Image (cartoon, rainbow, N blue to C red):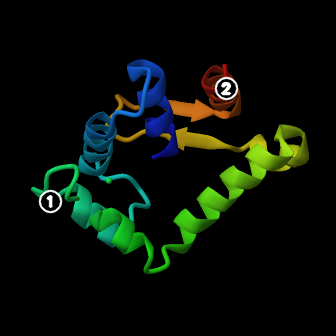
Amino acid sequence: MAVLVAESLLEQGELDLPDIFDRFRRWAAAEPKDIGIQTESVLTSDYAWDLAAAVHAAVDLGGDTDTVAAVTGGLAGARYGLAAIPTRWTEPLHVPLPGSGGRVLRAPELIAMAARLAA
């Protein structure tokens, strides 16, 4: 989902919440491997994006540990930099993007995206 947010920022040039929500919905509709039950429920509902970016926040307060770990890791990486991440963790990294035509991003593509966001 972080990749979808990054791609939206790059393509839209600003934070466009309806666009991000549409991307999340396409992702959820493609039945990703490890989507949380509550997240799937929100993203596949008929709620408008603004009623749903609030329900999602409330659900997250319940303790979705893989999401918490992903956000924490992202913040730690932003603080300490790529050099602090062991290569054995980044080499097997792959991010399949359900709903995106079978695209899979690996570390070099993700690093390039981060560099574009930083620019």
Image quadrant holding the C terminus, namely top right
Pointer 2: what residue?
A: 118
- Which comes before the other along the chain, label 1 or label 2? 1
For image coordinates 70% across by 29% down, the residue present is 111
Which residue is outermost to the bottom? 62
Q: Looking at the rendered structure, which numbered label has been put on residue 45?
A: 1
Which residue is outermost to the left? 46
Disc 2: CA contacts within 10 A as few (<14), some (14-19) or many (>=20): few
Task: Work out whether 108 lies above or below 44.
Answer: above
**Relative depth, front residue between 35 and 47:** 47
The disc labelled 1 sits on which kind of residue? Ser
Q: Is residue 119 left or right of residue 63?
A: right
Report whether residue 103 is seen: no
Report whether residue 34 is seen: yes
Q: Is residue 31 left or right of residue 88?
A: left
Per the image, label 2 sits on a secondary structure element best described as helix
**Relative depth, front residue between 5 and 92:** 5
Per the image, label 1 sits on a secondary structure element best described as loop
Task: Work out whether 51 lies above or below 29.
Answer: below
Q: Quadrant of residue 40?
A: bottom left
Horizontal and vertical percent position of residue 77:
76, 47
Task: Work out whether 35 lies above or below 10.
Answer: below
Horizontal and vertical percent position of residue 63:
49, 78
Disc 1: CA contacts within 10 A as few (<14), some (14-19) or many (>=20): few
Q: Is residue 97 left or right of residue 17?
A: right
For image coordinates 9% across by 56% down, the residue present is 46
Horizontal and vertical percent position of residue 24:
32, 45
Task: Work out whether 87 lies above or below 70.
Answer: above
Q: Quadrant of residue 4?
A: top left
For image coordinates 37% across by 52% down, the residue present is 32
Q: Marks 1 and 2, how far apart in space?
A: 34 Å
Horizontal and vertical percent position of residue 35:
39, 61
